[in-house]
Image (spheres, rainbow, N blue to C red):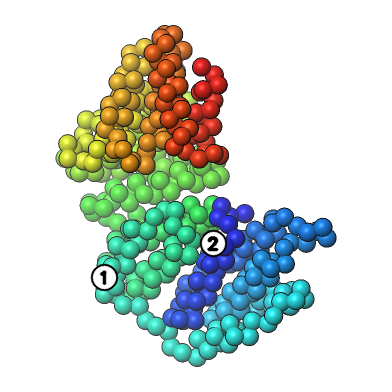
């Protein structure tokens, strides 16, 4: 089951068919992602509340089955795979049996597209499309993500002789955004496969090598989150260590790679606890804070101090060393003071503030810590919606102290 809802998936499937009709983009149409979308569309409808007779609601069901049938019909026209033809026939016949109309016009448009030459991509569009990919929000609708990825691929196909690796980096970002919308591990797998290939084709002396290692590591961590495979997290940590090694201390990305590794080790500690792991996390995050340039955005300074505060608090919880708790308290207040008023990290920062002061109250019993913990938890409850895990954490803190 996808993370997104019916209408968003329906729009994505329709968009893929539309790109075939308008540009004869067979490469986009024949991607397995389209098949996954068609299957998800039907699954979402099957999960909808059923009638007394135990059948899904007729109108959404007909739209889903017809659109899925048209996708497979288009795939057969573009690629000639008979299994696509059989699936299209099955779906469209099923829709007719429940009273659906034959989509004659849509099928005619799909057929007509096959008689026209494809619209060729233009390498001159690569830079504008690359900027468009960079600006695509991670929570953009699925159809928007797919459209931007298709346009970028289309232009890349015309870029013979150019170094396309920089564009691949942002195509990977679009694929990971797609995974964020669907939650389907095959989407993540496609992003990882391209990221691995990109790292293999990048020279270790290339200025982007460490960033590409770090991007692949992030995808590996997503894989661990998705399937619980500890080897994926092990590989992510190795990649991040390599990114740090390949970044000189005077490089602008040095602090970022230190922070990425330090944060990952803190998360790794949750899976495989050990004092040496959290100690290294603290040391790396301290170095990241110290290495962050003065002209970095305040949000970056705040985030790194917040991450260090959490690592110090985790270290205190494990070791009982009060110096770590005092350092965590200092760092979280520094982070809060640096956090811009409209920053998207405000919920995280409020939770960190509440949690650390709760630890301090439980360790020392000072009423001021209890007040601060509760005040931050109440503020957190106001800025996150019902059902958000952080809201649940805030409620828990308010119940327990």
Q: Is residue 239 left or right of residue 384?
A: left
Q: Is residue 337 left or right of residue 392?
A: left
Q: Is residue 249 left or right of residue 199?
A: left
Task: Judge whether 65 appears above or below 56 on screen.
Answer: below
Residue 346 visible in the displayed image: yes
Q: Nearer the viewer, residue 268 or 297?
A: 297
| Residue designated by label 2 | 8
Relative image position of residue 91 (x, y in whole percent): 69, 73
Residue 114 visible in the displayed image: no
Q: Nearer the viewer, residue 16 or 379?
A: 379
Mark 1 and mark 2 in contact? Answer it, CB < 8 Å.
no
The disc, 1 or 2, on the residue closer to the chain's N-terminal end is 2
Relative image position of residue 260 (x, y in whole percent): 34, 39
Using the numbered discs, state the Cα–Cα distance from disc 1 to disc 2 in whole angstroms: 35 Å
| Residue designated by label 1 | 162
Task: Judge whether 214 appears above or below 203 on screen.
Answer: above
Q: What residue is drawn where x is 46% and y is 89%?
A: 116
């Amino acid at each position: 089951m996808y993370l997104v809802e019916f209408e968003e998936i329906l729009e994505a499937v329709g968009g893929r068919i539309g790109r075939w009709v308008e540009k004869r983009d067979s490469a986009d149409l024949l991607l397995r992602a389209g098949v996954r979308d068609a299957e998800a569309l039907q699954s979402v409808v099957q999960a909808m509340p059923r009638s007394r007779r135990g059948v899904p609601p007729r109108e959404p069901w007909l739209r889903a089955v017809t659109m899925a049938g048209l996708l497979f019909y288009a795939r057969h026209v573009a690629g000639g795979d008979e299994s696509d033809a059989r699936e299209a026939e099955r779906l469209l016949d099923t829709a007719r049996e429940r009273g659906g109309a034959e989509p004659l016009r849509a099928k005619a448009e799909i057929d007509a597209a096959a008689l026209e030459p494809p619209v060729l991509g233009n390498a001159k569009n690569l830079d504008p499309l690359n900027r468009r990919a960079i600006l695509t929000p991670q929570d953009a609708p699925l159809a928007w993500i797919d459209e931007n990825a298709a346009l970028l691929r289309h232009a890349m196909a015309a870029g013979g002789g150019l170094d396309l690796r920089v564009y691949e980096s942002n195509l990977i970002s679009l694929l990971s955004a797609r995974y964020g919308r669907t939650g389907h591990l095959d989407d993540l797998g496609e992003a990882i496969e391209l990221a691995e290939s990109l790292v293999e084709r990048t020279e270790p002396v290339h200025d982007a090598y460490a960033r590409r290692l770090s991007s692949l590591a992030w995808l590996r961590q997503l894989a661990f989150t998705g399937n619980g495979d500890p080897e994926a997290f092990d590989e992510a940590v190795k990649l991040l260590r390599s990114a740090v090694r390949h970044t000189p201390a005077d490089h602008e990305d040095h602090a970022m790679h230190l922070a990425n590794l330090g944060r990952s080790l803190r998360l790794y500690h949750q899976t495989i606890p050990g004092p040496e792991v959290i100690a290294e996390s603290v040391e790396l995050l301290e170095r990241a804070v110290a290495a962050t340039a003065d002209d970095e955005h305040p949000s970056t300074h705040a985030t790194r101090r917040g991450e260090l505060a959490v690592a110090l608090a985790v270290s205190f919880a494990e070791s009982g060393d009060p110096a770590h708790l005092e350092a965590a308290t200092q760092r979280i207040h520094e982070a809060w003071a640096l956090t811009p008023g409209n920053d998207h990290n405000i919920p995280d920062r409020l939770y960190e503030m509440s949690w650390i002061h709760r630890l301090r109250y439980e360790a020392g019993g000072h009423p001021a810590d209890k007040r601060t913990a509760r005040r931050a938890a109440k503020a957190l409850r106001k800025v996150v919606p019902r059902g958000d895990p952080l809201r649940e954490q805030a409620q828990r803190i308010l119940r327990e102290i």
